[in-house]
Amino acid sequence: MVLISHLHWDHLDVPSLRALGMDTPIVVPAGAGPWLTGIGFSDVREMAAGDELTLGDVTIEAVPAFHSAFRPPVGPSAPPLGYVVRGGRSVYFAGDTDMFDGMAQLARPGEQIDVALIPVWGWGPVLGRGRHLDPKRAAESLRLIRPRAAVPIHWGTYWPHALGLVLPERLVEPPAAFAEYAAELAPKVRTLPTAVGDIVAWEGRR
C-alpha cells in the first residue's frame, strides 16, 4: 500500500506508481481519487483528516497537514494530509507541512509516537515558498509531537536530471542543522539523520 500525502509532483509521481503496478492499493487525500482512477489505477482509497483505515494489525489514521492543496499547473486539488501508522510501533509521516496546533494531539491519550518523519526543507536546493518547515521550525515541532525519535526527510532528495547539470552537489546541511536545533530544543527526542538511500535502524524502547 502507498500513502500519498498530497498531490505535488515530488510526492505523487505517476510513473513511479505505475511501476508498482496499476492494482497497488493507493491511499490519497479526499478528492484525488477520481483523477487517479481516471488514469487507470484500480484500487484508490480516499481519506480525510480524522479517517482511519485498518489493514490486518495495522491502523492508518489520516491527520491534518498545513500545505498547498493544488497540483500544478492545472490541478486537481485535494487537502494535504499526514498519516499516523500504528502497529507494533507508531510512526507519524508528516508529508509536507508547516507547524499547526493539532500537532500536539497527534498522539492518543497515554500514547507516545515512536518515530516522526519530519520534513526539514523543500524539494530542491531552496526551501521554496510557504508552508514548509525549515530545520529550526521542524525541531520546534518536536516539542508538540513529543516522539521518541525523529527522522529528518524532504531536504533536496528529489533531484531532477536537469537540476544536477547546474547544481551537481546535493544538499547535506538541512538534516544536520535540524539535528543541532533538536538537541537544543527537544533534547529528549533522539534524532536519526539518514543519508539518501540508507536504512534507518533503531531499536526504540517503550
Image (cartoon, helix red, strand yellow):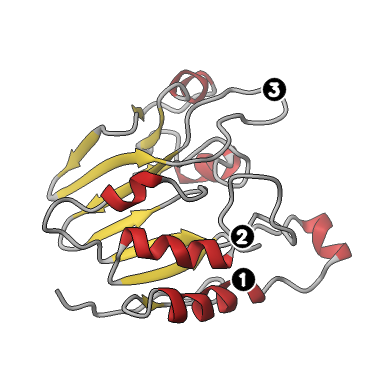
Q: Residue flagged by tag 1: what amino acid is it?
A: Pro
On the image, the x and y values in percent for residue 60 come to 25, 44
Please report whichever mark, 3 or 1, sits nearer to the chain's N-terminal start: 3
Is 144 situated left or right of 205 in this image?
right
Vertical arrangement, residue 175 with respect to residue 161, above or below: below
Residue ID at (25%, 61%) = 113
Is 149 situated left or right of 31 in this image?
left
SS category of the residue bearing label 3: loop
Distance between mark 3 and mark 1 Cα atoms:
31 Å
Verify CB contact (< 8 Å) between mark 2 and mark 1.
yes
Vertical arrangement, residue 123 with respect to residue 114, above or below: above
Instruction: Give the camera-side residue of 27 and 145.
Output: 145
Residue 121: mark: 2
Residue ID at (13%, 46%) = 56
Instruction: Give the camera-side residue of 186 and 28.
Output: 186
Residue 74: mark: 3
Q: Residue flagged by tag 2: what amino acid is it?
A: Trp
